Amino acid sequence: MRFQAAVARATLSVSPVSLLLAWTDWAGRLAGSPGKRLELLNLAQEQARRFTEYAAALAMSRADCPAQQCVEPPARDKRFVDPAWNHWPFNLMHQSFLLAEEWWQAATTGVGGVSPHHEHIVSFAARQWLDVFSPGNYLPTNPLVLQRTFESAGINLMRGLSNLAEDVGRNLTGQPPAGSEAFVVGRDVGVTPGKVVLRTRLIELIQYTPTTAKVRPEPILIVPAWIMKYYILDLSPHNSLVRYLVGQGYTVFCISWKNPGRAEAELGMDDYLQLGFFAALDAINSIVPGRKVHATGYCLGGTLLAIANAAMARDGDDRLASMNLFTAQTDFTEPGELALFIDEGEVSLLEAQMQETGYLTAGQMAGAFQLLRSYDLMWSRMVGEYLMGERPPMNDLMAWNADATRMPARMHGQYLRQLFLNDALSEGRYLVGGKPVSLSDIDTPTFCVATVTDHVAPWRSVHKIHYLTSVDLRFVLTSGGHNAGIVSEPGRPRRSYQALDRPAGANYISPDDWLKLAPQHEGSWWEDWAAWLDAHSGQAVAPPAIGSADYPPLADAPGSYVLEK
């Protein structure tokens, strides 16, 4: 274990054996595939012809009749959209780079006999390696940086050096990114009034103060993921989902998870169920007695909610009025690019490292996401802040994203093995209280939200709730990504979503069919959800008291757990 932990530290928790196995599988299969090698040779010759013709066309082109590019970038690749990239010699640079990407994409995919997991790893590794050599990443080969340097007499580079020095200093001293100081929890974000009414070893439960004369009788319990701090759902007052729900006439409770340390190393998934979800539900039943609860889970919190609801259905517990899932996966057979970092070798290496520390560090998790979106989170930032000298203003979502959390060693190992590696939940093998649970037992009306560009929980994976349950289901697909798609307050520009109801017991709708059938709506999905909740709630009544005899108020919101670093 100590040797594995040392390897993990040296390789940033990336298993060299897993990489070697993937490369060997790909290289060996390619070596034994003369047809594929001939195809790649033909592609290289075709690319050379196209590039030569393009270079010749450039010599004959005019401003009013530019040369036709020999390769178009992928639709989502915005690196070379500026007209400056069409000027010589930058046009030749970026076209040759895109041709190299095209060739390596062909070389690392479609090789007969390579396992899908190994193909994904090799293809991903090739993209990451090529990104290093993108002409947009360097001063001499980026026309926009050169133009800015000329216009400002190099001031941009001086500002970039200053930005780099500040970032290095902050990283070395453990300080948050520049500008985060403007978003203090409890002062600028996470400011919706409320009280902490329960504190366990693992959670603080916040009950928010009502702002309407009457409220719906069914309270809402929000279960955020413990990979994040809860206040993403209570950011600034204008984009706080919690504040919005309170304003719609609901009694809102929200779990705030403890940021675990060495003392919490042995906490497992069952502890997150019992000390987290069920402890919160018991408190709500005491404060709002006799009322069912609209349970709402975000990301991993949604997966935990689905597990809890399946266990409740198994045991005849009917305390939930509805189940609401935000970007939450219940089937992990196609979890997107996160699967690149999850196989037996990777998990074993990570477990060895976590056994020494007691937890997964925030930096390890952030590093994985940076690799998944290397251009958005690393290269574009380096170019913008260090070469162009432009530091974008900090906003509440960026500040929240930098306020990262840890994951207990035991829980994270169970999560990766039982859900990602073994897919035990969707296959009816996940144990709660020593007995398996099945999502097909759930009969609670369900509202499920996925986002179009989610890299953490791809929407087609989230969509699998359609065949795992037969409940009355409203599925929403909204614009945006894993976080920005959820923080989508009414009035925010350029927001849209599709939504479609699937009645209980109706036939399965595939993702492609769903896209064709679901109507498009402009605006925020929050309003759609509020209307759905209203339809599944009773007539408004007087608001309940804050806390109860068994659960007296302990502190003002946002509590103390969210402040732990």
Image: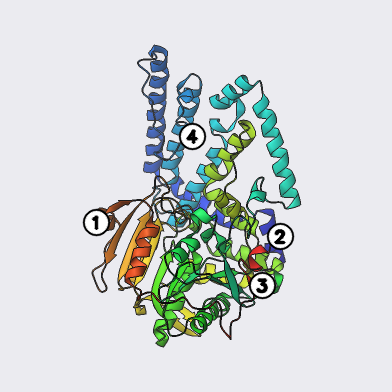
Q: Residues within 10 Å of mark 2 (few under 14, many from 20)?
A: some
Q: What SS does tag 4 mark?
A: loop
Q: In x, y percent, where is residue 370? A: 57, 49
In percent of the image, x 55 and y 41: which residue is there? 129
Can you say whether 534 is above or below 553 in the image?
above
Could you tell me if the residues under marks 1 and 3 are in contact, i.e. CB atoms within 8 Å? no
Q: Which numbered tag is attached to residue 6?
A: 2
Mark linked to residue 265: 3
**Amino acid at the residue labelled 1:** Leu
Whole-percent x, y for residue 21 in the image:
54, 55
Tag 4: amino acid? Arg
**Pointers 4 and 3 in contact (C-beta within 8 Å):** no
Whole-number angstrom distance, CA of label 2 to CA of label 4:
37 Å
Q: What distance separates the C-alpha of mark 4 from that of mark 1?
A: 34 Å
Report whether 35 appears left or right of 10: left
Task: Answer whether residue 218 is visible to the viewer in this image.
Answer: yes
Q: Nearer the viewer, mark 4 or mark 1?
A: 1
- Residue drawn where x is 44% and y is 61% of the image: 327
Q: Which residue is mark 4?
A: 79
Q: Which residue is mark 1?
A: 517
Q: Secondary structure at mark 3?
A: loop
Q: CA distance from mark 4 to mark 3?
A: 43 Å
Q: As rendered, which of 448 and 282 lies closer to the eye? A: 282
Q: Is residue 174 left or right of residue 283?
A: right
Mark 4 or mark 3: name the one nearer the start of the chain.
4
**26 or 234, which is in the foreground?**
234
